[in-house]
Amino acid sequence: MTATVASHRKPRQHPLAALTGGARSARTARTAATLALAGAATATGFAPAAEGAPVAAVADGAGRAAHRLTPDRVKDRVNALYQEAEVATQSYNGAKEAAGAAREELSRLQDEAARRTAELNAARGELGTVAASQYRSGGVDPTVRLLLSADPQRYLDGAAVLERAGSHQATAVAGYARRLGSVRQIQRRAEDTAQRLADTEAALTKHRVTVVHKLGAAEQLLNRLTAEQRQRMAGHGGAHGGAGQGRAGRGDGLPGKLPAGPGAAAAAAQAAAQAPDPRAARAVAYAYAALGKPYVWGATGPSGFDCSGLTQAAWKSGGVSLPRTTYTQISSGPRIDRSQLAPGDLVFFYSGISHVGLYIGDGKMIHAPHPGAPVRIAPIDQMPFAAATRPA
């Protein structure tokens, strides 16, 4: 039986191609075209706007010209755009995870359909042998009519087939009927999964376009500032303190200083030593080792991360598998009161739970903020605190 199955797996399209091929091809073409547009948006969305063009065209609904927006207003708007992009990023991550699961399920169903089709063909061959024997003996019995029927399933629905057939024929016919029903059931499940995959890929593309648009708008705003203004923004609201840290805005529109040298190693060792268990200690050590690596939306390392990608990778190094998004990571363990935080705990921000960091003690966390701001240490009161979880 194994050899027979292998021969039927090679084409991979049987028996699904006739049922799903045309519709899926059209959907795939549409998805590819949309992704191409999204890629074009990525390539063009970060280019600076023409000198004197109104910022309102990309980011400010009030219609103010660029020269009338103060650096503080630019910073607030940029932070808002980054937060909106992060919401879309988490939706993208969730859709990507769901698409991966649907793709794996579809592949499994295709393999199962190929195997069961091979069994069906073997059963049909057995029926053919019986029918040939009957024909040579001069009889044309229900088995032959089954093979010649344009609708075998409808014919099989008649109980008279089994009543008129002999014992061996009855067994063969029943086996064929059972396998035919099994193949059709798998085909229906594969059709449903293919549709779910297409819908999820469409959502994936939508979230990707949203992220690209938001990040492009933020970059255009930043490009309208002078180098001196950008430096002032970094110094005024960087990741390590300064005015405005308690405001709802992210407060770290540009990269800040990162710990380096023996001091960073000592801090990492101290935080790991204060972790509640060895798994959390390894997660903390991983987060420290990631300091300075770039934010890349949708990435889970090792060269770049988004916020939930960093926490997932950190805890994976400790032997704990976290789900992909902030919305699901918050349920990965018991909730921890802010006063009971320990190194390794996950800290979540904003009412929509759209950002996460890894707590390291002393009111600080390591997190991946947004594009242009690498993985860094920041106070947890820099953003509106929502909840904390200790992965289990």
Image (cartoon, helix red, strand yellow):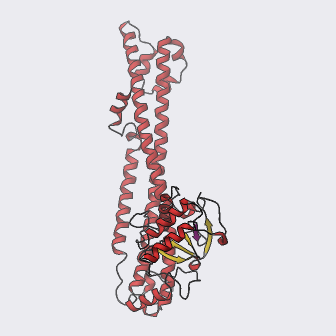
Examine the rendered structure and indicate whether residue 372 appears above or below residue 16.
Answer: below
Q: Residue at x 49, y 30 (%)?
A: 181
Is 351 displayed left or right of 310 in the figure?
right
Q: Residue at x 65, y 63 (%)?
A: 335
Residue toward you, 85 or 18: 85
The picture quadrant where one finds residue 275 is bottom right
Magenta stretch: dominant secondary structure: strand
Assign the C terminus to one quadrant of the image: bottom right
Asked if residue 357 shows in the view, the reply is: no
**Residue 296 at what x, y percent from top left?**
41, 69
The magenta-colored residue range is 345-349
Residue 346 belongs to magenta span: yes
Assign the N terminus to one quadrant of the image: top left
**Residue 112 at what x, y percent from top left?**
44, 36
Residue 39 belongs to magenta span: no
Examine the rendered structure and indicate whether residue 357 appears above or below residue 105.
Answer: below
Residue toward you, 102 or 293: 293
Asked if residue 113 shows in the view, the reply is: yes
Examine the rendered structure and indicate whether residue 160 appears above or below residue 82.
Answer: above
**Residue 341 at what x, y percent from top left?**
62, 69
Q: Residue at x 64, y 60 (%)?
A: 334
Residue toward you, 205 or 279: 279
Q: Residue at x 52, y 16 (%)?
A: 162
Residue at far bottom of view: 68
The image shows a total of numbered marks equal to 0
The picture quadrant where one finds residue 139 is top left
